[in-house]
Image (tube, rainbow, N blue to C red):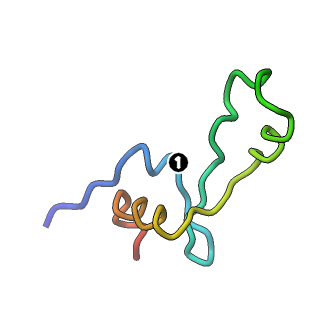
Amino acid sequence: MPKMKTKSGAKKRFKRTASGKIKAAVAHKRHRLISKPKKMKRKAKGTFTLAEGDANLVLTYMPYMRG
């Protein structure tokens, strides 16, 4: 059998935590930051864990992360 393909964009954007959850970076923090509130920029630091439904969708893109 041939190998299953992983979506290239997904492997760059998502990682797995030790407990098996999917973590991702917060959106809207790359450019045009002057017009965004300071509180929004502060809360966008770091990463967050995806909700269960979104995590299941990401796992369909990454077959070797499921195991």
Identify the residue at image location x=55%, y=75%: 20
Residue 47 location (% of width, % of height): 69, 54
Residue 21 location (% of width, % of height): 57, 71
Element class at badge 1: helix
Relative to 49, does residue 34 appear above or below in the rendering? above
* Front-most of residues 61 and 34: 34
Identify the residue at image location x=74%, y=44%: 44
Number of numbered labels in the structure image: 1
The residue that label 1 is drawn on is 13
Quadrant into which the C terminus falls: bottom left
Q: Amino acid at mark 1?
A: Arg
Q: Residue furthest left?
A: 1
Relative to 44, does residue 29 appear above or below in the rendering? above
Identify the residue at image location x=55%, y=66%: 51
Asked if residue 37 lies left or right of residue 26, the reply is right
Residue 63 in which image quadrant: bottom left
Relative to 39, does residue 18 appear above or below in the rendering? below
Residue 38 location (% of width, % of height): 86, 35
Quadrant into which the N terminus falls: bottom left
Asked if residue 35 lies left or right of residue 20, the reply is right
Residue 45 location (% of width, % of height): 77, 46
